[in-house]
């Protein structure tokens, strides 16, 4: 079955939001190296760099559209607060589903910046779960897995940062 990676995907550990990543993104790429075609691997590598937003791959198109709309909603909220025109910061012109505007507003209303970011990433995680529906052993699953792994890596860096040193740097 071309395009299905049953052995590879069944050997990957499950990912849960808020948990420690089982391995790094670089290790994930290493694991995939000999098990998927080079074009698929290159797509996943480019996706991690955020450069595959113009991809024809359906899951990536949907993911980048969701993320762009969410970022645009955050721009609108922040621009209103600062009394500036948001139009010069808006990217794309996708339809804004009401639940995405709600996600942005909930994050904005959170008094803790860190908790607001966690809320945004939890909603991104949920959007990825929706994109993965019906994809069990194909490239779409690997793309969603890679994006989730990147979210977990981000939070691992945040949680392991030396907060007192960072505070001192900001205060100085």
Image (cartoon, rainbow, N blue to C red):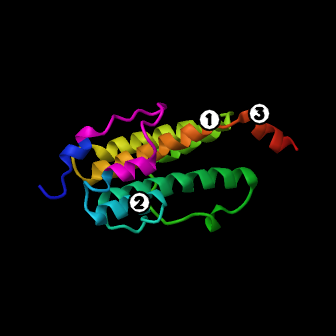
Residue in the picture at 59% in, 41% down? 157
CB contact under 8 Å: marks 3 and 1: no
Q: Residues within 10 Å of mark 1 (few under 14, many from 20)?
A: few
The numbered dot on residue 62 is none
The residue carrying mark 2 is 45
Task: Name above or below for residue 13 compared with residue 76.
Answer: above
Residue in the picture at 34% in, 52% down? 143
Q: Which portion, as a residue range, is magenta?
A: 10-31
Task: Name above or below for residue 123 compared with residue 78.
Answer: above
Can see residue 135? no
The residue carrying mark 3 is 164
Q: SS at mark 1?
A: helix
Image coordinates of residue 154 in percent, x first then y, are 54, 43
Q: Nearer the viewer, residue 154 or 36?
A: 36
> Is 25 inside the magenta-drawn segment?
yes
Looking at the image, residue 26 sits to the left or right of residue 170; the answer is: left
Task: Name above or below for residue 89 compared with residue 71.
Answer: below
CB contact under 8 Å: marks 2 and 1: no
Looking at the image, residue 167 sits to the left or right of residue 49; the answer is: right
Q: SS at mark 3?
A: helix
> Is 130 inside the magenta-drawn segment?
no
């Amino acid at each position: 079955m071309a395009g299905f990676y049953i052995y590879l995907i069944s050997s990957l550990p499950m990912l849960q939001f808020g948990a420690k990543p089982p391995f790094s993104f670089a290790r994930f790429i290493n694991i995939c190296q000999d098990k998927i075609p080079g074009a698929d691997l290159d797509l996943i590598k480019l996706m991690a760099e955020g450069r595959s937003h113009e991809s024809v791959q359906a899951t990536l198109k949907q993911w980048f559209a969701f993320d762009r709309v969410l970022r645009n909603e955050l721009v609108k909220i922040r621009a209103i607060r600062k009394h500036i025109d948001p139009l010069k910061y808006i990217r794309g012109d996708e339809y804004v589903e009401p639940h995405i505007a709600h996600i942005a507003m909930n994050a904005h209303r959170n008094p803790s910046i860190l908790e607001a970011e966690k809320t945004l990433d939890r909603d991104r995680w949920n959007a990825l779960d929706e994109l993965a529906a019906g994809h069990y052993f194909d490239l779409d699953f690997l793309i969603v897995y890679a994006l989730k792994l990147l979210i977990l890596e981000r939070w691992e860096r945040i949680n392991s940062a030396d907060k007192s040193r960072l505070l001192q740097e900001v205060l100085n």
